[in-house]
Amino acid sequence: MSNKDEKNRYSDAELAEFKDIIVQKLEKAKNELDILLIAITQSESHDTQDTSPTFKVLEEGASTLSKEEAGRLAQRQQKFIRHLEAALVRIENKTYGICRETGRLIPAERLKAVPHATLSIEAKNQR
């Protein structure tokens, strides 16, 4: 698969760092999904539990979306959440960060930008 100098998986400490990034992104994604679902079900309601500026901006943005647009965004957000949750499973299995095409490690910079990535840039470009 690779020479002896090349590591074939991320260390437990590195995996823990990636897990922190993913958990934060997952929490944010779930909050955004909740806002979209509120926009879909209660398009005119302004009753919010969270009054943070980010929530207000998202809520105002979501309120201008049609139910169809909000539905599409919610589906996309649910897919993103599933990808992040699958990445957490790969961390637990210690297979996180390994390209499913080449079997080599995906560079840490790519994983920090796209923490649910399962392909290296090289493998993705070959598709």
Image (tube, grey):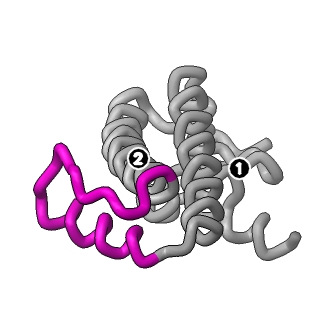
On the image, the x and y values in percent for residue 16 come to 35, 32
Q: Residue furthest right?
A: 127
Q: Nearer the viewer, mark 2 or mark 1?
A: 2
Give the amino acid at mark 2: Asp
Number of numbered labels in the structure image = 2
Q: Is residue 108 visible?
A: no
Circle 1 Cα neighbour tier, 10 Å, few/some/many (<14 / 14–19 / ≥20): many
Q: Which residue is mark 2?
A: 34
- Say which residue appears at 65% left-offset and 64% top-offset: 72
Q: Residue furthest front?
A: 44
What is the CA distance from the residue labelled 2 to the residue labelled 1? 32 Å
Relative horizontal placement of residue 100, taking residue 26 as reference (left or right): right
Which of the 4 image quarters holds residue 56?
Answer: bottom left
Q: Which residue is mark 1?
A: 99
Which of the 4 image quarters holds residue 58?
Answer: bottom left
Q: Quadrant of the C terminus?
A: bottom right
Dot 1 falls on a residue whose secondary structure is loop
